[in-house]
Amino acid sequence: MTVSYEILIRRSAEKEIRDLPREVRVRVVQRIRALASSPRPPGCEKLAGRDAYRIRVGLYRVVYTIEDRRLVIEVVRVAHRKEVYR
């Protein structure tokens, strides 16, 4: 049986996605959708000192939280790697 997580995107992260260059935005949205079936894909990393994970999409990072009990993933931040952890 395949478990599918619900994906929630914070309003601030939605705006960050909208502001990305088109080709990057397409790749980011694909990776976010893939999290529904695989919330901890190869290459994802648990962030130190936070209850969050990140995946890489080129020079950009998607930071998200996972609630396994509720089967929910919340995208918290999407930004260039230089800015994402500030």
Image (spheres, rainbow, N blue to C red):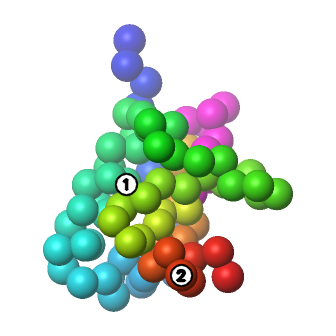
Residue lying at 56% horizontally and 83% vertically, measured from the top left: 83
Residue lying at 38% horizontally and 33% vertically, measured from the top left: 37
Q: Earlier in the sequence, mark 2 or mark 1?
A: 1
Q: Which mark is residue 82?
A: 2
Helix, strand or loop under label 2: loop
Looking at the image, is 70 positioned above or below residue 20? above
| Mark 2 residue crowding within 10 angstroms, few (<14) / some (14–19) / many (20+) | few
Magenta region, residue range: 64-71
| Residue 65, percent from left and from top | 62, 52
| Quadrant (top left/top right/bottom left/bottom right) for the N terminus | top left
In magenta segment, residue 56: no
Quadrant in the rendering for residue 49: bottom right
Residue lying at 45% horizontally and 79% vertically, measured from the top left: 80
17 and 49: which is toward the camera? 49
Looking at the image, is 74 positioned above or below residue 66? below
59 and 67: which is toward the camera? 59
The answer to whether one can see residue 8 in this image is no
| Residue 2, percent from left and from top | 37, 19
Residue pointed to by mark 1: 32
Direction bottom: furthest residue: 19
Direction right: furthest residue: 49
What is the spatial separation of the Cα atoms under label 2 and label 1, in whole angstroms? 20 Å
Q: What amino acid is labelled 2 in the image?
A: Lys
Q: What amino acid is labelled 1 in the image?
A: Ile
50 left or right, relative to 8 = right
Helix, strand or loop under label 1: helix
| Mark 1 residue crowding within 10 angstroms, few (<14) / some (14–19) / many (20+) | many
Quadrant in the rendering for residue 29: bottom left
Q: Nearer the viewer, mark 2 or mark 1?
A: 2
| Quadrant (top left/top right/bottom left/bottom right) for the C terminus | bottom right
The count of marks equals 2
